[in-house]
């Protein structure tokens, strides 16, 4: 149950795109199409942004998108806005009814 | 809108016990898979435990297996986490999270969290 690997921070100017990677193994990210992404503001509960690698829940802006290739999943924020500045966590089902999160990525809007 | 409210956190000495509760409302609790996820101060999210919508099966992270027990009371619409043999490294905000059984592999509803501090 080792944590998935995310960059500690990414940054971009308003209107730009940023991509957050999430690297796991064939036992988690690579083995299932069950990657989800969560946004968390300081002192607040996480919020689901993407499920099942690419699906966007109702109410999530379409500038958020997800993808996966092999053992690495990615979250892309297009048209970056000030309110997107937050921490982002990936999560994957890891088999045998267990889940594993990434270490989190801080997104800074310059 | 789904509402989840955790309670029961506090300060406990190493080796002690604590029971967390998560009161659910505004949705059909019996159809939801429920989880506990924790976050140590300044650190990332860590999955802790899961219980099936009907309570028939449970699972745990290796770090808490044998010490923590997840359960649910459908009549009271409440999720529990019994934490025994607590360690300093269990200090964290504990969130309950859930999802309708059709989306069992992610977490679409979260509580606000309750802080557990393990210290002498």
Image (cartoon, coloured by chain):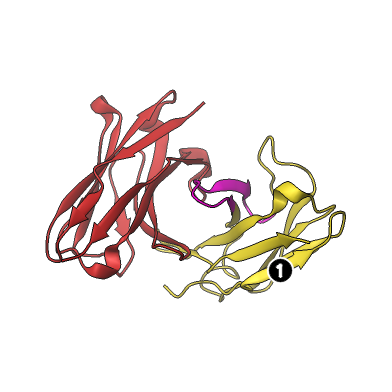
Horizontally, residue B42 falls left or right of residue B79, namely right
**SS assignment at label 1:** strand
Q: Colour of chain B?
A: red
Q: Disc 1 marks which residue?
A: A10
What is the magenta segment's predominant secondary structure?
loop
**Can residue A13 be seen?**
yes
Q: Going 75% across and 66% down the picture, which residue do you hit?
A: A11
Residue found farthest to the right:
A15
Vertical position of residue B3 compared to residue A72: above or below: above
Res A56 quadrant in image: top right
Read off the magenta span.
A39-54
In reply to whether residue B40 is colored magenta, the answer given is: no
Residue B110 image point, x, y percent: 46, 42
Subunit under mark 1: A
Q: Position of residue A29 (x, y in %)?
A: 58, 68
* Chain A tint as drawn: yellow
- Horizontally, residue A104 falls left or right of residue B18, namely right
Does residue A44 show up magenta in the picture? yes
The residue sitting at the top extreme is B26
């Amino acid at each position: 149950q080792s944590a998935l690997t995310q960059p500690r921070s990414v940054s971009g100017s308003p209107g730009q795109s940023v991509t957050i990677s999430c690297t796991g193994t064939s036992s988690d990210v690579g083995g299932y199409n069950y990657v989800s992404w969560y946004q968390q503001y300081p002192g607040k509960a996480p919020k689901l942004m993407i499920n099942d690698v690419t699906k966007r829940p109702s109410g999530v802006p379409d500038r958020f998108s997800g993808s996966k290739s092999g053992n690495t999943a990615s979250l892309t924020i297009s048209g970056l806005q000030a309110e997107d500045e937050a921490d982002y966590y990936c999560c994957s089902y890891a088999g045998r009814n267990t889940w594993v999160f990434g270490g989190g990525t801080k997104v800074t809007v310059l | 809108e789904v509402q989840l409210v955790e309670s029961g956190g506090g300060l406990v000495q190493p080796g002690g016990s604590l029971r967390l509760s998560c009161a659910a409302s505004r949705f059909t609790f019996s159809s939801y898979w429920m989880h506990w996820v924790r976050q140590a101060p300044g650190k990332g999210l860590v999955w802790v435990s899961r219980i099936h919508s009907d309570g028939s099966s449970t699972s745990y992270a290796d770090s808490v297996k044998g010490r923590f027990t997840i359960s649910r009371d459908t009549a009271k619409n409440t999720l529990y986490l019994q934490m025994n043999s607590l360690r300093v490294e269990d200090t964290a905000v504990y969130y309950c999270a859930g999802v309708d059984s059709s989306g069992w592999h992610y977490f679409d509803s979260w509580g606000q969290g309750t802080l557990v501090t393990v210290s002498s």
